[in-house]
Amino acid sequence: MTKVKLCGLSRPEDIETANELLPDYIGFVLVPASRRYVAPEQAARLRAHLSSRIRAVGVFADEEPEKVAALCRRGLIDLIQLHGREDEEYLDRLRRLTQTPVIQAYRIRDAECMERALRSSAEMILLDAGAGEGLCFDWSLLEGIRRPYFLAGGLDSSNVAGAIRKLAPYAVDVSSGIETGGKKDRKKMHAFVRAVREETVQ
């Protein structure tokens, strides 16, 4: 079954809805420049109320590895998601500090971007069009891909079933597609998870 990640949760009511839906993953955006940013202290308060059945992902961009590892040691996050210019040297530094699995995100614009993503030594990769703008990329670039991946970019309840049917990704990742006015929308969160699960049980 395709797994679900609801990203950019920032309020207690977002966590409450996630606990109802039990996605496989939720994401805390720990990138200060992002409009979805939550400070580590705020993320810790939210994590304290998160179901133990849901894995928390910390989203970073060009953060010092020591700071990322420190949050892992605090038990704040279960997986690290990298959205910046992190290279293999960065991954090596991070691995010396923590054994927390890494999801490396790539903006897919062409075949060269795709090849770079497939070479990543991260435990998992995430393929996106941008950084939370709600845009799709050219899914034909994924033809023949054999490495499991998180599919992101432009997904919502109206197109996620088709994406799963066409691409069979390991997981689907959504943020803007479950928002109204820049805030997570409970009805949209329910509709997205329902669309995924109805497709994957067929």
Image: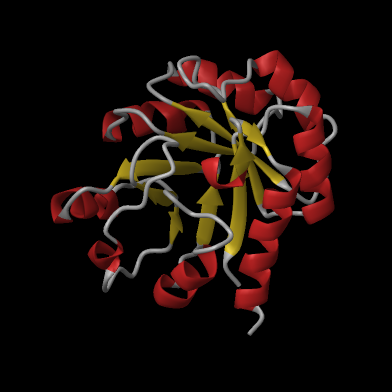
Q: How is the image coloured?
A: secondary structure
Q: Is residue 103 left or right of residue 58?
A: left
Q: Position of residue 161 (x, y in %)?
A: 54, 70
Q: Is residue 32 left or right of residue 51?
A: left
Q: Is residue 44 left or right of residue 172?
A: right
Q: State whether residue 50 is above or below residue 154.
A: above
**Which residue of the protein is positioned furthest toward the left in this rendering?**
112
**Which residue of the protein is positioned furthest toward the front in this rendering?**
181
Residue plotted at (49% across, 16% down): 66
Residue plotted at (49% across, 64% down): 159
Q: Position of residue 70 (x, y in %)?
A: 59, 19
Residue plotted at (62% across, 28% down): 72
- Tally of numbered tags: 0
Q: Position of residue 7 (x, y in %)?
A: 59, 40
Q: Position of residue 162 (x, y in %)?
A: 47, 72
Q: State whether residue 17 is above or below residue 156.
A: above
Residue 142 quadrant = bottom left
Residue plotted at (29% across, 28% down): 85
Residue 148 quadrant = bottom left
**Which residue of the protein is positioned furthest toward the bottom in this rendering?**
202
- Which quarter shows the C terminus? bottom right
